[in-house]
C-alpha cells in the first residue's frame, strides 16, 4: 500500500520520523528502520488501493495474517522491501511504496510455517508493484526449513502487467516466475492456498500448484485471464464471478473447498495442516482434541446400511460414527464435533475424501456417496480419488478405505468424459501407493471399479467386510439380465418374463451372502460393524509404530540434506 511519509494525519502521527544521528552509535539508523517498519504496518485509509480493498469487503493483508497465525508469532522477512521516493535536494524520504508481497515466518497451532501473502492494495498484486524474487525466495525458505507453506492469494501474485514493459523499457520472454520453486516446495512440505479475491494468471497457477486450496464464496474468482482479455479473445462479455466464481471452480476440481468468509478460509487451512507433518521427513502429528475411547461401539452402525439393497444412507454420518469425536472449545477443530475434515465436498461428489483421526492419529478417509448417482464413480470422482490418494501417499498418511462401489458410471456422457481413462489413473495411484491402506467393504464392490477400491493391493492388503457386503463381476440384477437374456426374451408374456426373473434371482440369493465368500477365503473376515472403530484404531496404532517410521526413513534417503529434487522425485499433480 503506497504511503505518504509527510502526512501525519493519514498515519495518525506514525509516519517515519527523522532521527538525529550523533555519529557515535548505530542507534539512529536502527530507530529510523523501526520507524519505517511501523509506518509500513499501519494502514493508510486515504490510499486508493486500501480504500478499494475495504470497499469490496476484503481484509487488508496484515489483518489476514493476524487471523491466520498464532497471536504475535509473525516474523516478517523483507519488512522494508519497497520503492522509496527521496527528495533529491534534501535527501529526505518523501514517500514509500511497500512491495505487494508480504512474507515471513509464523506459527499455526504452535507449529512453524512460512507465509507468502499478496497485498492487492498495491497495483493489484501485479509485478510492476512488486520486488523481483521476494515471493519465490519465501517458497524456497519454506522448503529448506521443512515447514508448511501458506499462500494468501489476491490478484496476480506478481504476475505480468503491460505497464511493466514501460518501466523496464523492453518486453521480455516469460519465465516460470518462481513456479519452479513452487513445484520444489510442494514435493517436500505441505502447501495450502487461500484465494481471497480475484486470482488471475500467475496467481491462478500458484493456486493449483499446492496440496489444498480454498476460495471464498462471492469474494474469490479464479481465471487464466480476466474479463477484458476474454472479451478480446472470445467475444464473451462476462463478470469476474461468471467467468471464474465458486460455482465453476468449486465444482470442476480446480479448487478443493469453498469457504463462507475469509475467516472461514483461513480456519480451514489451519485445520488442514493439523493432519499433515511439517515435511515428508516427519510423521503426521498425533493430536487428541477430546477424550474419545478407541473402544467406543456405536449401535447405530448395526442399522445405518438398510437391508433393502437399493436404499441409500448417509456415508458421512457413518464416517463420523467411526472416527474420533473432538471438542471444538478452543475453535481449533473442524467445527462439527468430529475429527472428520472433508476435502472436495462440492466436486467429484460420487467420492468422499478427507482427513480424520483415530485415537489422535491422522488418517485419510476414502469412500463413496451412494446418494449421488448411486455412488457410481465418474471422471471427476476418479480424478478426486487419484489426487487424494497421492496426497496421503506423499505425506505418509494411512488411508481408511470404506468401500461401497457399484462400478464405473456408464452411458454416453460417461464415455465422452473419458471415465475409464481417469478410472485407470485412480487404480494406478492406489495400487502403487506405499502408505498403509485398511479396506473395509461396507456394501457393494462390482466390476473393475469395485476391484479398484475393494482390492487396491491386488490381494495383498488388509481387508475385512461388513455383513451387508454385496459383490461380484456385475451387480446381480443386471448380470442376470445379461446372462439369461435369451431365455427372458423368449417368455410368452411380460408377466411370465417377470416370474422367470424372480426365480433366477432366488437361485442366486443363496450364493450372494458374504459369508459364502468368507468360506472360500474370498474375504478375510466378516466383522460386526460396531467393532469397526476399535479395529481401525488398532490398525492406526500399529502402522504409526511399525510401518510409517520405516517409510519415513526411505523418504529421507531419497533426498539430499538440502531437500533438493532430482528427476522423478517431484510431486505428481
Image: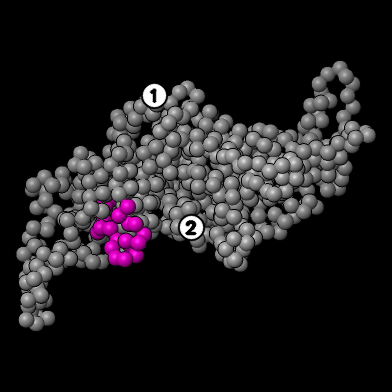
Circles 2 and 1: CB atoms closer than 8 Å: no
| Placement of 386 over or under 18, stated as above or below | below
Q: Which mark is residue 40?
A: none
Near-viewer residue (296 or 23): 23
User: Which residue occupies the extreme top position in the image?
Assistant: 24
User: How many neighbours does mark 2 have within 10 angstroms: few (below 14), some (14-19), or many (20 or more)?
Assistant: many
Residue name at image x 80 percent, y 34 percent: 35
At which x and y percent is residue 150?
Answer: 55, 41
Q: Which mark is residue 250?
A: 2
Q: Secondary structure at mark 2?
A: loop
| Placement of 501 over or under 191, stated as above or below | below
Q: Is residue 415 magenta?
A: yes
Q: Secondary structure at mark 1?
A: helix
At which x and y percent is residue 60?
Answer: 68, 49
> Is residue 316 visible in this depiction of the protein?
no
Task: Quarter of the image for the C terminus: give it.
Answer: top left
> Is residue 10 visible in this depiction of the protein?
yes
Near-viewer residue (165 or 64): 165
At which x and y percent is residue 479?
Answer: 15, 63
| Placement of 156 over or under 557, stated as above or below | below
Judge from the rendering whether residue 88 lies leftward or rightward of residue 230; answer left or right: right
Give me the C-alpha separation between circle 2 and circle 1: 38 Å
Judge from the rendering whether residue 140 lies leftward or rightward of residue 407; answer left or right: right
Residue receiving disc 1: 557
| Placement of 214 over or under 507, stated as above or below | above
Determine the image quadrant of residue 548: top left
Q: Which residues are magenta?
A: 402-421
Judge from the rendering whether residue 101 lies leftward or rightward of residue 356; answer left or right: right
Give the colour scheme shown: one colour
Residue name at image x 20 percent, y 66 percent: 308
Amino acid at each position: 500500500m503506497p504511503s505518504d511519509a509527510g502526512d501525519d494525519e493519514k498515519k495518525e502521527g506514525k509516519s517515519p520520523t527523522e532521527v538525529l544521528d550523533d555519529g557515535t552509535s548505530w542507534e539512529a539508523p536502527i530507530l529510523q528502520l523501526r520507524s519505517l517498519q511501523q509506518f509500513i504496518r499501519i494502514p493508510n485509509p486515504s490510499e486508493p488501493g486500501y480504500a478499494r480493498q475495504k470497499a469490496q469487503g476484503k481484509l487488508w493483508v496484515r489483518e489476514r495474517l493476524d487471523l491466520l497465525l498464532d497471536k504475535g508469532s509473525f516474523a516478517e522477512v523483507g519488512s522494508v522491501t519497497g520503492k522509496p521516493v527521496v527528495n533529491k535536494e534534501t535527501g529526505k524520504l518523501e514517500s514509500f511504496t511497500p512491495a505487494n508481497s508480504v512474507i515471513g515466518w509464523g506459527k499455526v497451532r504452535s507449529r512453524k510455517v512460512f507465509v507468502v501473502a499478496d497485498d492487492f492494495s498495491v497495483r493489484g498484486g501485479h509485478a510492476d508493484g512488486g520486488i523481483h524474487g521476494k515471493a519465490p525466495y519465501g517458497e524456497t525458505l519454506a522448503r529448506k526449513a521443512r515447514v508448511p507453506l501458506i499462500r494468501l492469494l489476491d490478484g496476480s501474485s506478481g504476475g505480468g502487467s503491460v505497464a511493466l514493459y514501460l518501466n523496464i523499457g523492453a518486453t521480455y520472454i516469460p519465465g516460470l516466475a518462481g513456479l519452479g520453486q513452487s513445484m520444489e516446495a510442494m514435493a517436500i512440505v505441505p502447501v495450502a492456498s487461500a484465494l481471497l479475491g480475484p486470482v488471475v494468471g500467475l496467481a491462478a497457477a500458484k493456486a493449483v500448484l499446492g496440496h489444498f486450496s480454498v476460495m471464498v464464496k462471492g469474494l474469490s474468482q479464479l481465471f487464466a485471464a480476466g474479463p477484458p482479455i476474454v472479451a478480446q479473445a472470445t467475444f464473451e462479455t462476462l463478470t469476474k464471478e461468471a467467468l471464474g466464481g465458486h460455482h465453476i471452480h468449486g465444482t470442476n476440481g480446480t479448487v478443493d473447498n469453498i469457504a463462507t468468509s475469509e475467516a472461514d478460509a483461513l480456519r480451514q487451512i489451519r485445520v488442514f495442516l493439523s493432519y499433515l507433518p511439517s515435511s515428508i521427513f516427519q510423521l503426521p502429528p498425533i493430536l487428541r482434541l477430546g477424550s474419545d475411547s478407541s473402544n467406543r461401539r456405536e449401535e447405530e452402525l448395526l442399522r445405518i446400511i438398510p437391508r433393502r439393497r437399493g436404499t441409500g444412507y448417509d456415508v458421512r454420518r457413518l464416517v463420523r460414527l467411526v472416527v474420533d469425536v473432538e471438542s471444538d472449545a478452543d475453535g481449533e477443530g473442524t467445527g462439527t464435533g468430529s475429527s472428520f475434515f472433508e476435502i472436495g465436498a462440492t466436486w467429484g461428489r460420487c467420492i468422499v475424501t478427507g482427513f480424520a483421526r483415530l485415537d489422535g492419529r491422522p488418517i485419510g478417509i476414502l469412500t463413496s456417496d451412494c446418494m449421488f448417482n448411486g455412488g457410481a464413480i465418474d471422471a471427476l470422482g476418479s480424478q478426486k480419488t487419484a489426487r487424494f490418494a497421492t496426497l496421503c501417499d506423499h505425506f505418509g498418511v494411512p488411508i481408511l478405505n470404506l468401500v461401497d462401489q457399484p462400478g464405473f458410471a456408464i452411458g454416453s456422457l460417461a464415455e465422452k468424459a473419458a471415465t475409464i481413462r481417469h478410472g485407470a489413473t485412480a487404480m494406478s495411484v492406489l495400487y502403487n501407493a506405499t502408505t498403509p491402506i485398511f479396506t473395509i467393504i461396507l456394501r457393494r464392490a462390482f466390476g473393475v471399479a469395485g476391484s479398484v477400491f475393494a482390492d487396491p493391493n491386488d490381494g495383498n492388503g488388509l481387508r475385512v467386510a461388513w455383513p451387508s457386503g454385496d459383490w461380484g463381476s456385475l451387480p446381480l440384477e443386471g448380470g442376470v439380465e445379461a446372462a439369461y437374456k435369451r431365455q427372458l426374451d423368449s417368455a410368452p408374456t411380460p408377466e411370465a418374463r417377470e416370474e422367470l426373473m424372480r426365480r433366477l434371482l432366488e437361485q442366486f440369493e443363496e450364493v450372494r451372502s458374504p459369508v459364502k465368500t468368507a468360506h472360500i477365503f474370498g474375504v478375510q473376515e466378516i466383522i460386526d460393524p460396531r467393532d469397526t472403530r476399535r479395529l481401525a484404531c488398532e490398525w492406526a496404532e500399529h502402522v504409526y509404530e511399525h510401518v510409517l517410521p520405516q517409510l519415513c526413513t526411505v523418504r529421507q534417503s531419497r533426498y539430499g540434506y538440502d531437500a533438493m529434487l532430482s528427476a522423478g522425485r517431484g510431486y505428481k499433480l
